[in-house]
Image (tube, rainbow, N blue to C red):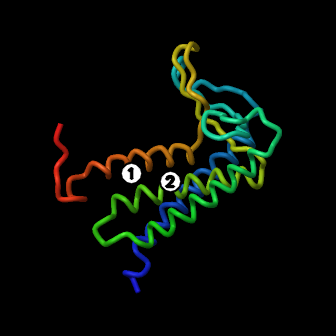
Amino acid sequence: MTARLGKLSWLWLSILVIALDQATKYYFEANFSLYQKVDVIPDYFAWTLAYNTGAAFSFLADHSGWQRWLFALIGVGVSAVLVVWMMRLKTGETWLAVALALVLGGALGNLYDRIVLGHVVDFILVHWQHRWYFPAFNIADSAITIGAVMLALDMFRSSKTGETVND
């Protein structure tokens, strides 16, 4: 039976990401007003409260609302693919299981916001001396990014094909 379930035992990590993501979003919504900024490391890092009705980097945020359901549908589809992928993983593919669990947890955290709230709650703001700002993001976005980097690194692991990468 364990072989049939692949690496679904790593779903605990997805649940942890969702819980941390939702708890932090709840905290910031309860304690910050929209666009309020509190410097943590002046000129570099701040807490804020922002809503994103679009996708990454507020893509399509200025549209009439149809994008909420498009991105929700994409989130559901991606989540289903990730679960099936995790089910098909072999015993030695723990790195890949962790990567997929992080992406899944982040996707579901933002999916919840999108469906229930109509927007994604962001609160982490990285900037450089008020001249350069990275778009605000959250724990779910961070998990997705870390998982995606792990997936990219996994593609270059020599043990996958038995070959080494040559320059």
| Left or right: 68 as drawn, with respect to 74 | right
Residue 49 place in picture, x, y as percent: 70, 34
Q: Are marks 1 and 2 in contact (CB under 8 Å)?
A: yes
| Left or right: 94 as drawn, with respect to 87 | left
73 or 114: nearer the viewer:
73
Q: Is residue 101 above or below residue 28?
A: below
In the picture, the quarter occupied by the N terminus is bottom left
Q: Quadrant of residue 76?
A: bottom right
Residue 104 place in picture, x, y as percent: 53, 58
Residue 88 place in picture, x, y as percent: 41, 72
Checking the image for residue 49, the label placed there is none
Specify the amino acid type for callout 1.
Leu
In the picture, the quarter occupied by the C terminus is top left
Query: For the residue labelled by badge 2, is the local secondary structure a helix, a strand or a loop?
Result: helix
| Left or right: 89 as drawn, with respect to 119 | left
In the rendered structure, which disc, 1 or 2, sits on the residue that comes first in sequence?
2
- Read off the residue under disc 1: 151
Q: Is residue 125 above or below residue 155?
A: above
Residue 151 place in picture, x, y as percent: 38, 51
Q: Is residue 140 above or below residue 4?
A: above
Taking the spot 58% from the left edge, 53% from the top edge, the residue there is 107
Taking the spot 45% from the left edge, 71% from the top edge, the residue there is 8
Specify the amino acid type for callout 2.
Val
Query: For the residue labelled by badge 1, is the local secondary structure a helix, a strand or a loop?
Result: helix
- Read off the residue under disc 2: 103
Taking the spot 51% from the left edge, 43% from the top edge, the residue there is 142
* 10 Å crowding of disc 1: few (<14), some (14-19), many (20+): some
Q: Quadrant of residue 52?
A: top right
53 or 128: nearer the viewer:
53
| Left or right: 133 as drawn, with respect to 89 | right
Q: In this rendering, which labeled residue sits more in front, label 1 or label 2?
A: 1
Taking the spot 55% from the left edge, 44% from the top edge, the residue there is 141
